[in-house]
Image: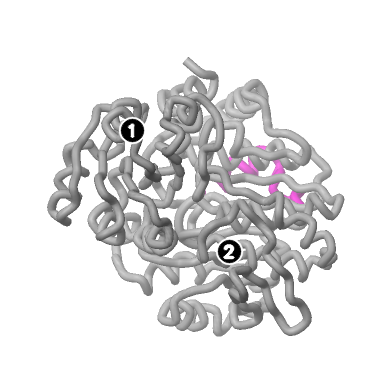
Amino acid sequence: MSQSISLYKQLANHKLFSKTINFDLKRIKLVLKKLGHPERKLNNVINFLGSSGKFTTLNSLKCFIEANNQTTSAYISPSLKDIKERFWMGDRYLTHQEIRHSIRTIAKLKVPLTIFEVLTVVYIINASKRNTEYHLVEAGALFAKDSTNVFDFPLAQVIVNINKQHLNFLKKKTLDEIVYQKVGFLSNFTKIFVGKQKSNILKKIKRNLKDNKSKINYPNSWKLIKKNKHFFYIDKKNKIKLNTKNIHSKGLFENLCHAIKIALDLKINRKVINKTIPIISFEGRFQYLKKGKIKKKLHKNERIMLDGAHAETDAKNLANYLRNIKVPKYAVWAMMKNKEPDLFIKQFKGIFKKIITIPIENEKNCMSAKDLKSIAKKNQFNVNEAKNFKEAIEMISSSEKKLINCIGSLYNVGNILNKN
């Protein structure tokens, strides 16, 4: 058993800690008080919240800051291959030993916490001991009572694309309530950067922020344009070519542009941004496997791409990209139970020659391959089910030139990357 899986099991089986999602800031604030308020030692905190694009926007900004010879800590969720990936500490990830030690410290306080709250405190404890210049913090779900909403005076708060994700956590299952829970509890003493949104969502965001006294940057302050097959970031003062072979979709380009806007506001030089763009990549998001055990077993005509997108908006973004790929396309589909599989898979009508559904290894809360098959069948896809990823690939792989897409879950993508 890997140390990462062992750590997750340790947390899941701990009497004090619960896997149940339970939004309430009282517990984590009590723990932080007992620890002497380590969160107050974190300067230049930048929160990332919203539905789709938190990690890619955070990761892009992190790359720009570090290319500018400044340091960052970062807290992300979920991790893909290893729990360590959640905790970046300036020049390295936390070790498993450091994470275990922090968990023991938290457990001694005897305050019941959710697992996400525990992981947030692990980050805060360790980040507070390091002299990094920026602290980039990704929210879990919503924001009003998310455990990352504990910083009194963040430097900035970044709102990425908001969509119907996280409806299952709300009593009022409406977009108005989602926007309110994500945006209605931001600081009045910060800079707010709003990413690209659907027009109706942007109106709701503006309504929630009308009395907010922070400096607000709305998405009309910059544009993503395409000219002669190249994408560019444009604002009143800058035109920056998005010179990259690692980013493949409009949605991801918009997230990159959003990070450029914030980097420019942080006074990061355009030359630094230009040099950094080609080296930015997003693991598990539109990621082609170019080497490794899985790639080696495929026929030379076959390519495989991983994308952990699991929401309707993300599916549309991926579908728009795949429509321009002129080879037969197959899918290996896995998904967690708290998502909307029907809305997700509908976006791929006419795209996949065949879908193979699988469960997610080591995840009790995943949908069964049988249930996913039933949903795909109802939507008139050619579909079959497999016991696991290995069997799914065996069912698809042949000498036919094709693109195999692994879709529907970051947890499944993490499993595949570990196998590779």
Q: Is residue 168 magenta?
A: no
The disc label shown at residue 397, or none: 1
Q: Could you tell me which secondary element the residue under label 1 belongs to?
A: loop
The image quarter containing residue 301 is: top left
- Residue 27 in sight here: no
- Give left or right: position of 395 versus 120: left
Q: From which residue to which does the magenta span run?
A: 26-43
- Which residue corresponds to the image point at 46% horizontal and 28% vertical from the top-left? 294
Task: Name the amino acid, label 1.
Answer: Ser
Name the chief secondary structure element in magenta: helix
Q: Nearer the viewer, residue 73 or 380?
A: 380
The disc label shown at residue 253, or none: 2
The image quarter containing residue 128 is: top right
Mark with earlier residue (2, 1):
2
Q: Is residue 37 magenta?
A: yes
- Give left or right: position of 188 versus 208: right
Badge 1 crowding class, 10 Å Cα cut-off, few under 14, some 14 to 19, many 20 or more, is: some
Q: Nearer the viewer, residue 316 or 163?
A: 316
Q: Nearer the viewer, residue 1 or 343?
A: 343
